[in-house]
Image (spheres, grey):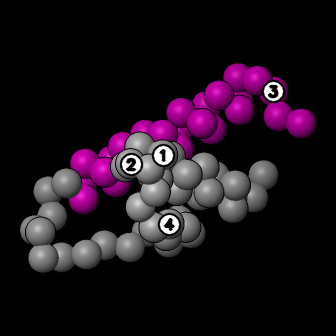
């Protein structure tokens, strides 16, 4: 089991990674599509926040460790 400080550091690192990806994707032209590896592709369901939250949790669930 990881110490709490290390687990919090891992979560913070992953959040920063996702925010950087979102920032990069927001500057892409509208006619270009990007796909992120290991991120589940869910259909839109009850709004953007629940759908994107499910995708983020799905990504974390698929990561080793």
Mark in the foreground, 3 or 4 = 4
Mark 4 or mark 1, earlier in chain: 4
Mark 4 or mark 2, earlier in chain: 4
Residue with the mark numbered 3: 3
Residue 2 visible in image: yes
The magenta region covers 1-25
Residue with the mark numbered 1: 50
Mark in the foreground, 3 or 2 = 2
Mark in the foreground, 4 or 2 = 2
Q: In which quadrant will I find the N terminus?
A: top right
Residue at point 36%, 43% (across, down)? 19
Residue at point 71%, 30% (across, down)? 6
Mark 3 or mark 1, earlier in chain: 3
For label 2, the crowd category at 10 Å Cα-Cα, with few meaning under 14, some 14 to 19 and many 20 or more, is few
Q: In this view, does 20 lie to the left or right of 36?
A: left
User: Residue 42: which disc?
Assistant: 4
Residue 18 visible in image: no
The quadrant where residue 30 appears = bottom left
Q: Which secondary structure, mark 4? A: loop
Which residue is nearer to you in this view: 53 or 27? 53
Residue with the mark numbered 2: 47
C-beta proximity under 8 Å, tags 2 and 1 = yes
Q: Does the magenta stretch include residue 50?
A: no
Mark 3 or mark 4, earlier in chain: 3
| C-alpha separation, residue under disc 3 versus residue under disc 4 | 33 Å
């Amino acid at each position: 089991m990881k110490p709490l400080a290390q687990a919090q550091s891992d979560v913070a690192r992953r959040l920063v990674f996702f925010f950087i990806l979102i920032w990069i994707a927001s500057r892409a032209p509208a006619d270009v599509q990007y796909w992120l590896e290991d991120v589940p592709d869910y259909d839109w369901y009850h709004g953007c926040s629940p759908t994107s939250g499910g995708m983020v949790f799905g990504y974390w669930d698929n990561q080793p460790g």
